[in-house]
């Protein structure tokens, strides 16, 4: 299974292509960034990001697109513009029939470094070990893209599924393991 | 000149196609909405919006895309998701070589109803008069799309250009009309 992980950004979109060989094991195929120029119009920068995504999808033919989900911000304007970039990234995945997985930053950290409170350095350290790399992928946006892909491979989606089943209302739980019956 | 005006929304994107016959005069060609289902995944809804835009552009071949610009919100999450929709709308315009004009709500109101503080009803009333329609376009999202197109035709872009030239640094102004020379 080939996973394209993306850390969206209007100026710099980081990406990583990771191959999941067997559960919990993965190798890095490629990583890098799609850069756009601040002096260009937003619509033109969005097209560059979309073109970059299409080129990556055509070249690697991944089955999964794992995208960092960000829905909060200190600066609302920045986050809204980032929403535009995420929009064309998700669109590219959908247009090419990829399975799309949106993953919050804390879940990426948890899947890669074991805790949602991990620092950027801890995530990069674990990412380098898990993928048996000689050094941390650069620039850091590329490493963030790799982390998004690796988090999917490391079963973040399974963790989410089990979290979903844990939130089933009490009456449907097995009373033998603590659920309340009515 | 044919202008496609769009009021972006994740659930309902309103649009209006307006033909500018001569300065200050315009006629409505078509208006309507692109609707998406709340139960569908965001990526799938974005593709529907992008497909809808491509269909409109292919059918009418407009030269200009005028899109309502919103960069603030009471609810940050809603605005960020709206940013995704705007992203694929701007992308569609860019992919088909349209001139793209992003226009803030207050400028739309000013261009159509004479003041940035106009109510929705005042804008709809003026829009109906200016386009010589028998009734207000419905639903209101479609009317908002028409307003974005009409605002472009009514010279909002010219107003913006003159505002831009007014902000030229004093030393480049003609000293005979009040500019400071150094």
Image: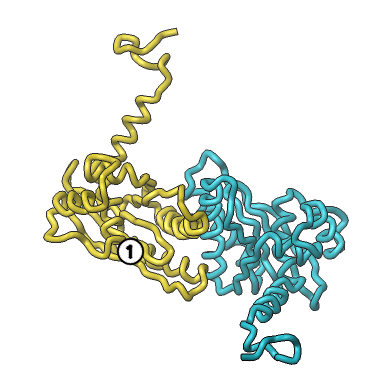
Chain colours: A cyan, B yellow
* Figure check: A59 above or below A14: below
Q: Is residue A132 above or below residue B66?
A: below
Mark 1 sits on what residue?
Answer: B56
Q: Position of residue A134 (x, y in %)?
A: 88, 56
Q: Position of residue A69 (x, y in %)?
A: 61, 61
Determine the residue positioned at 67% across, 63% down: A5
Q: Is residue B129 left or right of residue B157?
A: left
Give the mark count. Answer: 1
Chain letter of the residue carrying label 1 = B
Q: Quadrant of residue B13?
A: bottom left
Q: Position of residue A119 (x, y in %)?
A: 78, 53
- Residue B172 vs residue B108, the one in the foreground: B108
Identify the residue at image location x=41%, y=71%.
Answer: B36
Q: In this view, which residue lies farthest toward the front? A: A182
Residue A16 can be seen in this image: no
Left/right of residue A78 with respect to residue B67 in the rendered view? right
Q: What residue is shown at x 49% (from left), y 71% (from top)? A: B44
Mark 1 closeness class: few <14, some 14–19, many ≥20 residues within 10 Å: some
**Residue A114 visible, this orientation:** yes
Asked if residue B164 lies left or right of residue B20, the reply is right
Q: Is residue A56 left or right of residue B170?
A: right
Q: Is residue B172 above or below residue B6?
A: above
The residue at the point 31 percent across, 51 percent down is B63
Where's residue B53, x and y in %?
Answer: 38, 63
């Amino acid at each position: 299974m080939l996973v394209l992980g993306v850390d969206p950004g209007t100026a710099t979109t980081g990406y990583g292509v990771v191959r999941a060989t067997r559960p919990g094991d993965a190798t890095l195929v490629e990583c890098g960034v799609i850069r756009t120029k601040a002096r260009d119009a937003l619509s033109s920068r969005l097209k560059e990001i979309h073109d970059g995504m299409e080129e990556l999808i055509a070249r690697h033919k991944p089955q999964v697109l794992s995208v960092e989900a960000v829905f909060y911000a200190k600066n609302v304007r920045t986050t809204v513009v980032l929403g535009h970039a995420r929009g064309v990234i998700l669109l590219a995945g959908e247009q090419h029939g990829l399975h799309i997985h949106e993953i919050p930053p804390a879940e990426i950290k948890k899947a890669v470094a074991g805790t949602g409170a991990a620092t950027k350095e801890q995530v990069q350290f674990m990412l380098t070990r898990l993928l048996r790399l000689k050094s941390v992928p650069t620039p850091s946006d590329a490493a963030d893209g790799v982390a998004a892909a690796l988090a999917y491979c490391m079963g973040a989606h399974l963790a989410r599924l089990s979290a979903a089943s844990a939130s089933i209302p009490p009456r449907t739980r097995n009373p033998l393991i603590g659920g309340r019956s009515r």
